[in-house]
Image (tube, rainbow, N blue to C red):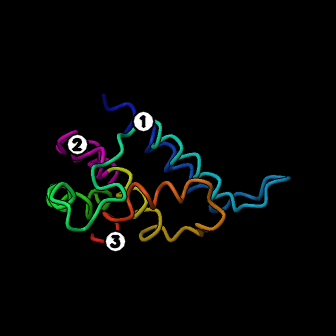
Amino acid sequence: MYEKYVTALRLMDQTILARTDPKVEGETRHPVTVKWDELFTFIYANFEKPVSAKGCWNNPAFKEEYDLCRPFIDGTFRAPSEELESRIRRIPPVILDVVWPIAIARFLARDCGLPFNHRESRTFTEFHYRYGNMVVSC
C-alpha cells in the first residue's frame, strides 16, 4: 500500500537533485521541470483525483476534504527524514492521497526553492485542475 508513497519520495528526491543537473541535449526545459513532470505523471497515474478537483469553493465535499487535509499539509515534510515515514503512516489513507501531492509540491516550491517553471511543465495544467483549489485555500 505504501509503495506509491515511497516511489513518489524517490522521484521527489530526483527532482531536488536535478537543480544542479545540466540540460539534456535536445531538451529546452530546465532539468527540474523535466523531473517535476516525471514525478507528477507518476502521481496522476497512482493517486486518486481529490473530490475538490476543480470544485466549487461552496461545495460541502470540498469543505469536508479541506478540513480533513489541512492539519497534515504543513509540517509533514518538515520532519527529519528518519521521522518522515512514521509521520506518513499516521495519516489516514483517504486523506493521504489528497495531501501527498500537495505537500510534495509545496515542499519543492517553498522549502527547496526549486527553479520550476510552470509554463514549461507538461503536467502543471492537470496539477492546477486537481489540486489548485486545495493549494490556494491552504
Q: Residue furthest right?
A: 26
Q: Is residue 131 above or below residue 119?
A: above
Q: Residue at x 70, y 62 (%)?
A: 30
Q: Chief secondary structure of the magenta span?
A: helix
Tell me the tag on residue 136: 3
Across and down, in percent, residue 55 comes to: 31, 59
Which quadrant: the C terminus?
bottom left
Q: Give, as a three-letter code, the residue at label 2.
A: Ser
Residue type at mark 1?
Answer: Asn
Rendered view: 94 above or below 112: above
Compared to residue 138, the image places residue 62 above or below, namely: above
Instruction: Tell me if residue 96 is in the magenta stretch.
Output: yes
* Pointer 2 residue: 86
| Residue 131: in magenta span | no
Q: How many numbered dots are placed on residues in this image?
A: 3
Q: Answer yes or no: do the residues labelled 2 and 3 have beta carbons within 8 Å?
A: no
Horizontal arrangement in the rendering, residue 113 relative to residue 25 (left or right): left
Cα distance between the residues tagged 1 and 2: 21 Å
First-in-chain label (1 vs 3):
1
Answer with left or right where residue 131 lies relative to residue 120.
left
Reading the image, the residue beneath label 1 is 46
